[in-house]
Every structure is written in C-alpha cells, then in structure tokens.
C-alpha cells in the first residue's frame, strides 16, 4: 500500500520497539490462615513487571526466566493492530540469530481452518517444505526426521493469531491440541492473541506466561515513530506532531498509540491535507476516503462504484462477524455471495481485490482462495457502516430473552458498536441516543436484590444485575464516540460514584466488599470513556468537601491514569498537593499521580521533599513519603538519607524502624544499613515476637540470595523461644529468597519433620520447599498429611482421572476435617479443568449444608478456574441463584459465568430454582423486610 505513494520504507526503517508487561491474575489464598493473618482472605495482588524489548528477548527467551514455564510457553496479547505479529516476526529473526541450533516454525493459526495443528504441520507445512526442495510431497522419512527435531528440543513454534482460529473457544481448543499431540509439547511455543479473547473467556492456557504488548507512549514513542517515518521530510512530521497536540484531539492522541493506526495516519498525512477527527469512526472514514484517492490513477472508480462497493463490503463484514467460524478468514464461496465472481472483471470482488480492501491470504482444503480484509479493524468499520438500526445490537424481550437479540454482550461486536456510535450521519443521531438510553435502562431480570421486596430504594452498583452492569459499562465507553449524547455527563458521574464507593444507602459489610471490587473495573472504564468528562468528574470529586481521604486518594490515583498532559488534571493535583486539609497519604498519592501525568513535575518532588524536611509529621509519614519519592525520583539522596536517619533514630518505635528499613531496601536495593537493621531483631532476645515477624517478612522482600539474611532466618527457624507465627514467617521468607540454598533447604526439611510445631507451620515449610525447588516425602497419615497429599496431587497430576477421583472421594468423605476438604477442593481447581466429575462434586459442595463457609468459598474459587462450557456454567448459576445473598466470592463466580454465557442461557439458569428454594428465599425476604 505504501509503495503506491512512493513510500518505500521497510519495517526496520520505522520500527520502534514496544515494551511488554508481565500479567498475573489476582492471587487466591490457599489453605487455612491464622487469625493474625485474617486480612489475607481479602487480599488481591496483581504483580506486573515491565520489560524493555531487548530485556524481554534476553531474559525470557534466552535465559528462560519466566515464572510459570521457564520460557517454554509464552503468550503475547494485545489489541488489534498493537504490533503483536510484528513483534513475533522480530522474535523469529532474533531467535534464529541468537539461539544456537534453534529451528523456527511460523504458523498463522487462521490457516489451520478445520485442521488440527499436528496434521497441519505434518501435511500442509511439511509438504510446502518438500516442494521447495524439489519433491512432490513429504516422505515418511522426512516426517520422521521432522518429529525427531521436536524431540531434540530445538524447535520453536511461533503461532500467530489465536483469536483467528475457527473454533468456538480457541483457547480451549488449542490447549487440547497441545495436550494430545505428543511431539508438539516438546517445542518452545510463543503465541499471539487478542486481549479480549484472552481475558474474556475461561482461559485454558493458564500454564502460559502472559505478556501484554504495550502501546506506544504519547508523545515520546509516537513522535519518535513519526520522526522516523518523515526522516526525508522532517517539517511534515513536525506539522503532524503539532496537529496531534491541538486542544480537543486527546482521543486521537490515545488512538494513535496503536502502531497500525499510527502507520495509517502517517501514510495519509503524507498524502495531503489530513485532518484529525475526534472519533475512531471519523479517522477510519478518513482512511477510507484517502485510500480511494491513493489508487485513483491505477484503478479509476466513480462515486457510484465506490458507494456500491462500500455497501457490499459492509454486508460482507457484518455477516462474517456474525458467523463465528469465518469471522476474519473468508472463503471464496462466502465472499462471492456478496461481491460476485472473482473471474468476472466487472464484479465488486475484482474491484475489492484491486483496491486492496480484500487480499488473498491462503487457500482452503479445496485449494480455493481464502480472503481477508486489509485489517480486521477495517472489517469492523465496514460492518458498522452497514447497520442503520440499533435494534440489530439489542432487541430486548424482558420476560423471554430467548426471543431477543443481545449482540451487546458478545465481545466480537464491541468494536463495531463503538464505530457505529462514532458515525457522523445526522439521521443516526436519534438512533444513537435511543441506543444509549436502552443500554443505561437495561434490566436483565437477574438482579441479586429486588428492592421492592427488601426495602432498598437507593441505587447501588451491586443492585444491578450482571448484564445490566455490562450494558451500562458499554454505554460508558460508547459516549467517547458519541459526542452529542445528552446523558454523557450523567453516565460518567454515575460510574465515578460506583467506583469510589460513596453511596447514599444502607451498606452491609458484604456490600462494601463488592463496592471495593467495582473500583478496579470502574478505573478501567474511565480510561475508555470520554476522558474530558471523566477528568471533570474526578476533579469535582477531589474538590468536594463531603468525601473522606481514602476516596480522595483513590480519585487522585485514577486521575493519574487518565490525565496525562491535561492542564485541569495537573492543576487539580497541584492544588491537592498544596492543600493543608488532607492527610499526608493523600499528598503522596497526588504527588505520585502528578509524576505520571506530568513527568518530572517539580511541585510533586518539592512537596515530598518538603514533607521529609518538616518537623511535625508522623514517623510513618516520613517513611512513606521517602518511599514515594524513591519511586518517582529513583536514587533521590534526600529520600535515602531520610530513611537512613529513621532507621538509626532512637526516637522511633521498633515497628517504624522496621518499616523504614524495608522501604530503604526497596528504593536502594542491597543497602547494608537496611539489611543490618532488619537482621538485628532476629538475633535479639529483647524484642517481641511481632517485631521479629515484621523483620522476617521485610527480609523476604529485599534479601534475595543474601547469605547473612538466610543465616539469620535459619537461626530464627531453629530457635525455641519464638512462637509458631514468627517461625512460619521465617519459613515463608526463606521460600522467597533461598532458592537453591542448601542451608535453607535443610532447615525447612527439619521444620517439616518436626513434631513440636503446629500443622500450619509444617504446611508453610512444605510450601517454601516447593518454592525453592524440593519436595517432601515424609509425614504421618493424619489430616495434615491428607491435606499435603491433596496439595501435591493438585500440582503433579493435572487432568489425571485417578487423582481427580481421589480428591472427589476426600470431598465426599465424612471422616475428614474441613481443612482437608478445602485443600481437596483447591487441588481440584488446579487439575480438574473441564472434568465433569470434578465440577459436579464442587457444585455439590456448594450446595452442602454440613461444611463451613470457607469451604464453600473454596469450592466457588475452584469452579471459577475449571468450568469450561455453558453446561457447566448453567449448573453453577442455577445453584447460586438459590442463594438469597451472594457474598463476594460467589458473586465473582457468577460474574465470570455471566461474562462467558449468552444472556438468554444465563436468564434461564437464574430462574430455574426448585420450589423449596423459592419458598425459603421469599420467607427470608419477608422476615428481612419486617426487621427493617
């Protein structure tokens, strides 16, 4: 395409390496906990690590330094056009050059069609190799040699486009093929996938280390790409950079962080007087218009031809998206139904191929061409242009959803919906307003609360049904494209209200738990909705005198995610920093957010320095301010000096000193004063057990590989004067920092075999041994041993029918304690993916009245991991719909089901309760209403 405009740039001419971020799901508590660590039940952690391009190649591919697979299974995910394929190509070149004896095999997964990967490799791919060497077909010897290469562990399989596989659930299907195709499992696999598929479905590839490709940063990387593109005509590049910075172009600034869209922008900007529209639809319309201009001399068309082609491309795109098996790879027979015969020189198909809107990307099993749009994003745009009635997306039958249309809940339609909302035709304005109204007012009939029955009349996020919340979220994102929406301000304000937990209603503890869980989802929505309105709503919240400091701090954090370069956001955070009426931790959050949206902001750094130099702040404030300053201004001498002074001060308590030493170790790794300060309480006989526990915990974070630290923790393990809680923390810290250390391993083995410590301490020893590379083969046959056996089965026998049967037997036994039953349920969550017996047993456990709530919660957590299809989800939803009140753990499970079930199926399951359940539920509601 670029060559028609005289642009002959190669990928390497403009390639700007993208970073990647390691993604991990929130951790789930395993086993029982002590009362002193009760908060762990509610703790959610998402640890992310960012890699620069070269570090990713070196550390993950060459050194195999990945947490799950040791570099053998890597998934690269991202949005359409994010550069996943380009990155995979760079990986192919790098592996071929840098890794000795490597054999790289590239497979575009859409090319598999109905074939499985194994047969595709042995037949189609290997046949092409044979033809290149002058042979008609792949001989048996060639196939045998090919398999032998896999068994030598030299083969790299680079699988591009998992989301383009012809399967109802590509994740589950490719996972099955990996399991069943023996020699393929010997290869190192790197695959790419769209993030909406990876995150939107039950993920059967949980053994893959997942890395999301980052967008270009704006303005740094975007302008670097533009500079490289316009090297020969730098003034034109500067004009584009200036145009992007104009007021009102914030959405486009965000849009062109995507490498594909930036490429197209540069291309059409180079062709003439480009203007930057406000919406994605406007930008794609500009791309389409310019695309026709680019080739008008080679392939002359009149306006009638272009109009007819666009209409038919839209019909084709819409039908393809609606037909799952042929969404992006389009069979010739299918395409011909809309565009005519390819052999007809006057057909629209011939015109589409000449213009480049469609391209041949392969052949099917019958050796007929397979086509694809220039990019899937254009297919979604043309589909949006073909839809003139919003009821195509949503036609709601409240009491009988099976008769309705609910494409709003199908992830493949989300982008098309957003593009449709961005269309500028005047005759669609009323249609778009009606659609937003329908989304905002959607009632799914599956809400947990019937407010009339129980006396709740105020509107609350957790009052909304699962699909109601989904519909409202879509409306929130959609108003970024529909600029004239009359309810835009109201929608954004409501989302902010839900996310930051200030409600004018009765709040029970469980409702508060759900409110906190909405915050992260709302923060994500705020990054996608109309940013000006989102910023305005957050600014209003920050300036309000009726919110608490926690809410204000959370709002400041969210503003740090969406306010980059926005003068109002920057001014508000500066004002917050200078305010004397807020807590110091709010000052620190404001400083951190300000550093994100206005790098090197001197006020943020100066405010933290001022906090550190003040005489009347709390010790904890000094420590936290120093740590924040160390994060936003690494190596800051004032921060390091302040923490050293706190550590050495005789006027602070032991807890503050430990915290300061921990912070010092984080911002100045290897600091000898920090380590010495934390080791000292471990060896002292005059400090309390809690101080030792805190010191041991902190050393587990900063003392990796340090022999002094390991020796001190081992000594603590062996001490007879500390309590089991402290000993457990020492064992846990050794598990984090003692990998491969013989002294640490020996001490943990000794602890595991001890008869003088409690079961939970031995469990922690076993867990730490697994972390640092050793197993356990000793114990007596008691409940602890059974729990340990259940835990081991869950790690070493994934999918094994005998192991699953043994765990199910433990679940159903009447002679084991709840701790053992919980561990069995946990292990089923690790090895029972898709297994009908395991799922049925866990559903039965959910229904049990003889086990405690923690055990039922573990059953819910495990089911969330292993349910695979609608039948499983139907059974789970049917069971949980009978619960009058869903606590947050059950809510998570039903929420996950709702994300992966067609709405009519969910509705049916939700309302299929037996008579006894209905009676009991109504009775409880009546009693509850009377009490209120």
Image (cartoon, rainbow, N blue to C red):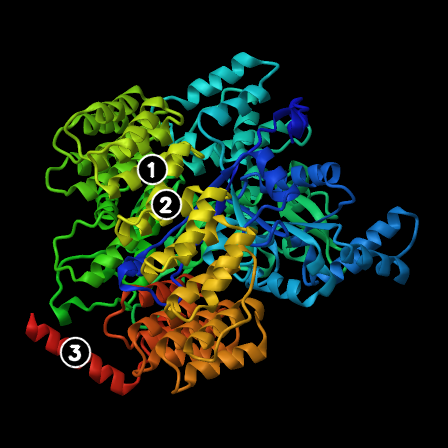
Q: Decide if residue 885 is on the left or right side of residue 235.
A: left
Assess whether mark 2 and mark 1 are in contact (beta carbons under 8 angstroms). yes
Q: Decide if residue 304 is on the left or right side of residue 549.
A: right
Q: Decide if residue 698 is on the left or right side of residue 580.
A: right
Place of residue 825 in the rendered image (x, y in percent of width and height, measured from the top left): 43, 73
Place of residue 281 in the rendered image (x, y in percent of width and height, measured from the top left): 44, 38
In the image, is residue 519 above or below residue 599? below
Residue 434 bears which disc, if any? none
Place of residue 179 in the rendered image (x, y in percent of width and height, measured from the top left): 65, 66
Quarter of the figure with the C terminus: bottom left
Cα separation between marks 1 and 2: 8 Å
In the image, is residue 155 above or below residue 527? below
Of marks 3 and 2, which one's residue comes earlier in the chain? 2
**Most foreground residue, 15 or 295:** 15
Cα separation between marks 1 and 3: 53 Å
Query: Which residue is under mark 3?
Result: 924
Quarter of the figure with the N terminus: top right
**Most foreground residue, 719 or 837:** 719
Determine the residue positioned at 42% across, 86% down.
813
Closer to viewer: mark 3 or mark 2? 2
Residue 661 bears which disc, if any? 1
Of marks 1 and 2, which one's residue comes earlier in the chain? 1
Q: Residues within 10 Å of mark 1 (few under 14, many from 20)?
A: many
Per the image, label 2 sits on a secondary structure element best described as helix
Query: Which residue is under mark 2?
Result: 698
Per the image, label 1 sits on a secondary structure element best described as helix
Determine the residue positioned at 38% across, 38% down.
676
In the image, is residue 421 above or below residue 174? above
């Amino acid at each position: 395409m670029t060559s028609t405009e005289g642009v002959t740039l190669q990928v390497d001419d403009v390639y700007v390496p993208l970073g990647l971020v390691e993604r991990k799901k929130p951790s789930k508590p395993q086993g029982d906990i002590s009362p002193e660590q009760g908060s762990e039940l509610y703790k959610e952690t998402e640890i992310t690590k960012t890699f620069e391009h070269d570090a990713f190649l070196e550390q993950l591919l060459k050194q195999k330094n990945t947490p799950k697979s040791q570099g053998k299974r890597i998934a690269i995910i991202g949005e359409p056009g994010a550069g996943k394929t380009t990155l995979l190509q760079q990986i192919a070149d790098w592996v071929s050059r840098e890794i000795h004896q490597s054999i790289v095999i590239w497979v575009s997964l859409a090319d598999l069609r109905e074939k499985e990967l194994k047969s595709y490799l042995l037949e189609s791919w290997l046949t092409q190799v044979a033809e290149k060497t002058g042979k008609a077909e792949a001989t048996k010897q060639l196939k045998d040699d090919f398999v032998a290469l896999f068994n030598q562990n030299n083969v790299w399989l680079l699988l591009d486009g998992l989301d383009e596989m012809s399967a109802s659930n590509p994740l589950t299907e490719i996972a099955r093929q990996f399991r069943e195709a023996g020699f393929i499992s010997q290869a190192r696999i790197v695959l790419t996938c769209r993030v909406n598929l990876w995150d939107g479905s039950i993920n059967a590839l949980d053994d893959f280390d997942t890395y999301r490709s980052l967008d270009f940063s704006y303005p740094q990387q975007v302008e670097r790409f533009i500079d490289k593109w316009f090297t020969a005509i730098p003034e034109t590049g500067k004009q584009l950079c200036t145009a992007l910075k104009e007021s009102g172009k914030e959405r486009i600034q965000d849009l062109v962080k995507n490498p594909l869209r930036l490429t197209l922008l540069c291309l059409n900007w180079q062709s003439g007087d480009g203007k930057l529209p406000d919406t994605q639809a406007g930008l794609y319309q500009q791309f389409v218009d310019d695309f026709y201009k680019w080739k008008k001399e080679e392939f002359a068309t009149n306006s009638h031809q272009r109009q007819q082609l666009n209409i038919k491309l839209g019909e084709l795109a819409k039908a393809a998206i609606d037909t799952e098996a042929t969404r992006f790879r389009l069979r010739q027979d299918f395409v011909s139904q809309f565009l005519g015969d390819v052999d007809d020189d006057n057909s629209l198909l011939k015109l589409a191929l000449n213009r480049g809107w469609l391209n041949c990307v392969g052949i099917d099993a019958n050796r007929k061409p397979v086509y694809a749009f220039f990019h899937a994003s254009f297919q979604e745009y043309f589909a949006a242009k073909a839809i003139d009635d919003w009821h195509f997306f949503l036609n709601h039958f409240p009491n009988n959803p099976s008769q309705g249309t609910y494409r709003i809940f199908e992830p493949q339609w989300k982008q098309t919906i957003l593009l449709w909302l961005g269309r500028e035709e005047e005759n669609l304005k009323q249609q778009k307003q009606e659609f937003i109204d329908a989304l905002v007012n959607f009632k799914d009939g599956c809400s947990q609360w019937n407010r009339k029955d129980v006396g709740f009349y105020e509107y609350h996020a957790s009052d909304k049904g699962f699909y109601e919340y989904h519909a409202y979220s879509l409306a929130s994102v959609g108003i970024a494209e529909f600029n004239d929406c009359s309810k835009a301000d109201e929608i954004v304000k409501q989302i902010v209200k839900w996310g930051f937990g200030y409600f004018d209603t009765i709040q029970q503890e469980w409702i508060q738990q759900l409110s906190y869980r909405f915050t992260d989802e709302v923060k994500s929505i705020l990054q996608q909705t109309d940013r000006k309105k989102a910023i305005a709503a957050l600014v209003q919240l920050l300036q309000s005198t009726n919110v608490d400091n926690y809410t204000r701090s959370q709002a400041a954090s969210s503003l740090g995610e969406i306010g980059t370069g926005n003068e109002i956001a920057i001014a508000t955070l500066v004002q917050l920093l200078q305010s004397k009426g807020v807590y110091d931790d709010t000052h620190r959050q404001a400083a951190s957010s300000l550093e994100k949206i206005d790098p090197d902001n001197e006020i943020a750094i100066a405010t933290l320095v001022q906090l550190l130099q003040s005489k009347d702040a709390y010790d904890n404030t000094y420590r936290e301010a120093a740590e924040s300053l160390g994060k936003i201004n690494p190596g800051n001498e004032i921060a390091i000096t302040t923490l050293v002074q706190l550590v050495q001060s005789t006027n602070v308590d032991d807890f503050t000193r430990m915290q300061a030493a921990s912070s010092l170790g984080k911002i100045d790794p290897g600091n000898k004063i920090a380590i010495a300060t934390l080791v000292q309480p471990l060896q002292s006989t005059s400090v309390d057990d809690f101080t030792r526990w805190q010191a041991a915990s902190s050393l587990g974070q900063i003392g990796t590989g340090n022999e002094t630290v390991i020796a001190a923790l081992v000594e603590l393990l062996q001490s007879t004067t500390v309590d089991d809680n402290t000993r457990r923390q020492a064992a846990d810290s050794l598990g984090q920092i003692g990998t491969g250390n013989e002294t640490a391993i020996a001490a943990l083995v000794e602890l595991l075999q001890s008869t003088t410590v409690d079961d939970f301490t031995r469990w922690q020893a076993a867990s730490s041994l697994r972390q640092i590379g050793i197993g356990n083969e000793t114990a007596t046959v008691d409940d602890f041993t059974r729990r340990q056996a259940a835990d081991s089965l869950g790690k070493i026998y994934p999918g094994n029918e005998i192991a699953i049967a043994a765990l199910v037997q433990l679940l159903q036994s009447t002679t084991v304690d709840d701790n053992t039953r919980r561990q069995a349920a946990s292990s089923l969550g690790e090895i029972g993916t898709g297994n009908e017996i395991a799922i049925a047993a866990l559903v039965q456990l959910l229904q049990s009245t003889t086990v405690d709530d923690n055990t039922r919660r573990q059953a819910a957590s495990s089911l969330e991991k292993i349910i695979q299809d609608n039948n499983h989800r139907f059974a789970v939803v049917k069971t949980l719909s009978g619960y009058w009140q869903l606590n947050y753990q059950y809510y998570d499970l039903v929420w996950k089901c709702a994300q992966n079930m067609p709405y009519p199926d969910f509705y049916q399951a939700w309302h299929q309760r037996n008579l006894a359940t209905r009676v009991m539920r109504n009775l409880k509601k009546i009693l509850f209403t009377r009490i209120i």
